Image (cartoon, grey):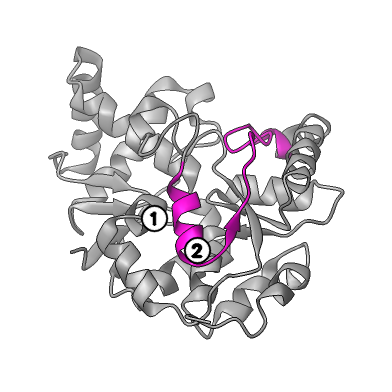
Amino acid sequence: MVESVGYYPGCSLHTSAREYDYSSRAVLKALGVVTREIPDWNCCGASSGHSSDHTLSYALPLRNLIQAEEVGSDLLVPCAACYSTLRVTEEYLAGGSKDARILQGKVEKVMGKPYQQKVKTVHPLDLLTRPEMLRKIKAGLKRRLTGLKVAPYYGCLLVRPDAAAFDNQEQPQKMDVLLREMGAQVVRWSYKTECCGGSLGVTQGDAASPLVDRLVAEAKKAGAMAIATACPLCQANLEGRQSKMMPVFYFTELVGLALGIPDSSEWLKAHLVDTKSALDQLEGVIAGG
């Protein structure tokens, strides 16, 4: 049974995705999991590190992994981009190539402490869909999500590349399972892992916007009244660049609503698209009702 985990918020969860941070921590606390933020963490370089400097793209996440070893054996990373970067770095170093050993030695020398490969990077979606956690969620439901038709959106980084995969890469199911356990109606659609434009939403909005509109249009066509995601960049793109005004929730926000966490209404105030139209469907629906 998971009782304590290291926690890496990354840059976005302390800034533009604070509602993801708040809801993740609150849900884990409600389920009896203590989160311990790793000390003196740094940006993992997820958005641009790999394209600007190959060595830096591994050195930045490696520094975080070394810091995380002071906290525990599991490191929880909610941001899909950060999660992918840290997992890829773990796999790269575990491979033990000559280049990986040289890189590791350089970072260890700068930090004055070794990397012992004691930490396992875990995404909250993977953690919350473990059998024991699903049982806890089901037992703790205060409100079922009956009436909410939602399209689960994983994006293109959460279960790709191979190093990051904890679910089927073409047709992931873990978010589907979690949402169904809470009573939501999960719609079937073929765009779960299609790209939303990622960081192009910042630098080339004209390229990202058509991708976002297509995703939202397909979610609506499938019958969804909302989208659930697990990536701060995906959430920002989907909510901020669409023209159809469909609510886009972090999946942890929906777990928090189902568990009846009092602060859940505060998270929703940060959304650009009003969530009322979707949440009005849940009025009066309590667990077991």
Q: Is residue 217 magenta?
A: no
Asked if residue 84 lies left or right of residue 35, the reply is right
Disc 2 vs disc 1: Cβ atoms closer than 8 Å?
yes
Q: Quadrant of residue 109?
A: top left
Q: Kindly identify the amino acid type of the residue bearing the numbered disc 2.
A: Thr
Q: Earlier in the sequence, mark 2 or mark 1?
A: 1
Nearer-the-camera pick, 140 or 213: 140
**Magenta segment:** 173-201
Horizontal side of 202 relative to 32 (left or right) equals right
Residue 16 in sight here = no
As drawn, the residue found furthest toward the top would be 98
Q: Nearer the viewer, residue 216 or 120?
A: 216
User: Image quadrant for the N terminus?
Assistant: bottom left
SS state under label 2:
helix
Which residue is at a point 56% across and 78% down the rendered structure image?
A: 264
Residue beneath label 2, please? Answer: 252
**Does residue 271 appear anywhere in the picture?**
yes
Circle 2 crowding by C-alpha within 10 Å: few under 14, some 14–19, many from 20: many
Coordinates of residue 248 in the picture (x, y in percent): 68, 57
Q: Residue drawn at (57%, 34%), measured in percent from left and top?
A: 193
Q: Amino acid at mark 1?
A: Pro
Q: Nearer the viewer, residue 119 or 186?
A: 186
18, above or below 69, in the image: below
Q: Which residue is mark 1?
A: 124
From the viewer's perspective, tell me whether residue 231 is left or right of residue 214: left
Asked if the magenta segment contains residue 197, the reply would be: yes
Element marked by disc 1: helix
